[in-house]
Amino acid sequence: MRRQNPYTWAGLGLLVAGCLTSIPAYFIFGSVWLTALGLCMLILAVILLALGRAVPRLPPEVCSLLLETGIENIAALIEELGIKTRAIYLPSSPTCLYPRAFIPLHANGSRPEITRALPKRLIARYGSNPEDIGLLVNTIGSAAAGMIEARPGATPEHLESALTSLLSGRLGVADGTRVICFNNHIRVEIDRPRLENGSTWSHQCLGGPLATLVASVAAEAWQKPMTISKEERVNGKHTVELEVGS
Amino acid sequence: MSLYNRYILTVSLALLLSTVLMIAAGLDRLQVYFTIYVFEALVISELYVYFNRKARRALAYVSALLFGCFSIALFLQIFNILT
């Protein structure tokens, strides 16, 4: 027998209970309220059975393993190279179909200007000088941005809707989001996040998992490079501040 | 709590609370109970717009089924009135 998820089992249980309650209540006892209670169970059963087919089948533990492995590999690479510069989240381009994070290897305090689409390689050159080189890596945000059904518009409302849909509806890692735009900054407040933020070297460079998700989606929405300028967690609310590049 | 669990909890609470209220009000017509249930389920499903595409499609089928049942109940009621 195929492995069913808890929603399907609960749905089947309620379906049987609903039939056993409503049919005798209506045809034998003639009790309206008991029949109504049975109908309640049947409606819930249909909803649960429908949702049982839609919820992800992969157990959360497997997802966690994949996530941790990916993060640790990128962290090891960044730490070995001793990179301290902040990553620039780039939108998708004709050469790369999903947003990626670019980490300049040499930075003299200023953010490098990336004017052309970078090649789809790990080590990518963005300028004509020998030191204009960096790492182009995939983050959690790269894959997650692909889960959004349509590219959000460059407005706070569209970004908020896309992020809530992704973080709350698809991934289930937060309860909701709020987006505020000011000057060339975007402030995203994430309600009750369920992803822990590490404090390793790579997090200083790339940002936490939630920040990478937010930055990738925002880069895709604005079609401009984004940098995580601030990230903090206060009173169960995770705040990510992004700087919009030119 | 995941969005799916929150949705199921909301629908369950709404249906059970309305059942208790309707029993307390002394309603004895099954059509009224059913109409209220269908209305609640449809409204709550519409409010949860952040589900993924697969879940939304599955809930759209449920909504269509509930609406179909409601239409049949309504048709029978009209038929009874007319005959």
Image (cartoon, coloured by chain):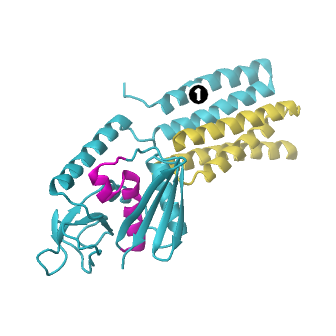
Chain colours: A cyan, B yellow
- Give the main secondary structure, helix, strand or loop, of the magenta stretch: helix
Question: How far across and how far down the image is residue A239, in percent?
Answer: 48, 57
Spot occupied by residue B51 in the image (x, y as percentages of width and height): 51, 50
The image shows residue B31, relative to residue A223, as above or below, that is above
In the image, the segment drawn in magenta is A198-224
Nearest to the observer: residue B50 or residue A130: A130
Does B33 appear in magenta? no
The foreground one among A112 and B59 is A112
Classify residue B29 by image quadrant.
Answer: top right
Q: Secondary structure at mark 1?
A: helix
> Does A201 appear in magenta?
yes
Visible residue check, residue A24:
yes
* Residue at image point 64% right, 26% down: A18
* Quarter of the image that includes the C terminus of chain A: bottom left
Q: Residues within 10 Å of mark 1 (few under 14, many from 20)?
A: many
Residue depicted at 27% across the width and 52% down the height: A201
Q: Is A134 situated left or right of A192 in this image? A: left
Label 1: which residue?
A: A15
Give the amino acid at mark 1.
Leu
